Amino acid sequence: MSIQSIVPEHIRGLTPYPPGKPLSELARELGVTSAIKLASNENAFGPSPLAQEAMQASLSELHRYPDGGAFYLKNRLAQSLNVDPAQLMLGNGSNELIELLIRTFGSPEHGVLTSETTFVVYRLISTAAGIPFRAVPMKDLTFDLDAIADAIDTSTRMIFLCNPNNPTGTRFSREALDRFVDRIGDEPILVLDQAYVEFVSEADRIDAFGILARRPRTVILRTFSKAYGLAGARVGYGISHPELVDYVNRVRQPFNVNLLGQVGARAALDDETYLQRIIDATNTGLDLICDALRQLDLTPVPSFTNFVLFDCHRVAKPIYDALLKEGVIVRPMHAYGLPNHLRVNVGTEAENERFLSTLRRVLSAL
């Protein structure tokens, strides 16, 4: 008897998450050894030297389990965010927190509502857990909050809003979110996924903590993977009402945030100067890339992140493949229903220049 016969239908229909192609894989497949990866929205500049030093100093403790409650990291985060440590939940990246929220509060009768063309993990985790999942169309590649509010019904347990959004880079305004919150009331859990919040100016940010103060069934998700450059350490965090956090912690596995991640994240919070340098360099690189794309008659989508989605005005896969052969890894978007688009994250100055010069050459050849 085949294995397939014992796999539930909702699992058989899943497509694995398509990560950005690793540099090692490109070397194996095409023999390219000097490639650059601009496909996974990583911080190309690396983590703070303070974080690296703290992690290096902790290597001798790797034979010990980490603090399962992450006491010191939670207290440092609470100080930074001006919240109670009991309001904090930690995960192996914010991805794990998305899974924990869905597993804790979803049911076969009460599911997830979000938008199309947003972070695909919301759909994958919901489907894998047998939780109903619905997505409404976007409007101009941005969350249509009115359409989401219209779609809420008695089965809606949780709403995911990624702002700024991955993969489009777009955002909705503070005023639009306030109107949305007024419409939806207090019942569904509202998850505000802010993985890229550090790249948004204070004037353009939504008032996530104000929303949380108004309605306890709100969760704010953030991560050390992007602006802080700790993607490989896998540390995400959430802020919510202590009672909600308590239920998530009942589902959470022990020791889910590793020792190096905990000490690295704590140290990264202490290096505000380095964080600002990363933000400034990212904004400079983003402007450079967007200006160059327009000169190539490509259309970048306005972005408030460390990446830009751009319309090639043709099927983009041949462009992606040609860039790949030249050792430049970007992200194709056909899995998101955008076959004419590619996504590229900001790299170092040299990486940005190589991407643009290679793109010019590829477009000319095609």
Image: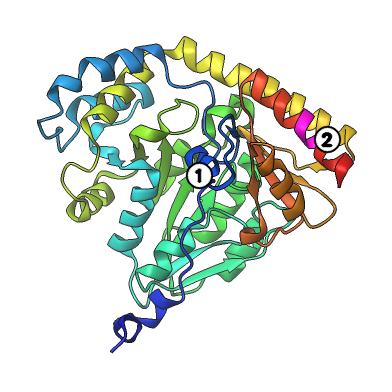
What's under tag 1, amino acid-wise? Arg
Q: Residue at x 66, y 43 (%)?
A: 324
Residue 18 in picture, x, y percent from top left: 51, 55
In depth, the one of 197 and 242 nearer the eye is: 197
- On screen, 184 above or below 1? above
Report the residue that reaches farthest toward the top.
273
Report the residue that reaches farthest toward the left.
64
> Residue 28 bears which disc, if any?
1
Q: Residue at x 71, y 53 (%)?
A: 141
Apparent side of residue 211 relative to residue 246 in the rendered image (left or right): right
Q: Residue at x 48, y 45 (%)?
A: 193
Q: Residue at x 29, y 84 (%)?
A: 6
- Whether 360 is among the magenta residues is yes
Apparent side of residue 290 relative to residue 51 in the rendered image (left or right): right
In depth, the one of 330 and 213 nearer the eye is: 330
Badge 1 element: helix
Apparent side of residue 122 relative to residue 359 in the rendered image (left or right): left
Badge 2 element: helix
Span shown in magenta: 357-361
Q: Which residue is mark 2?
A: 361
What's under tag 2, amino acid-wise? Arg
Q: To which quarter of the image does residue 69 belong?
A: top left
How many marks are shown on the rendered structure?
Answer: 2
> Residue 123 bears which disc, if any?
none
Q: CA distance from mark 2 to mark 1?
A: 24 Å
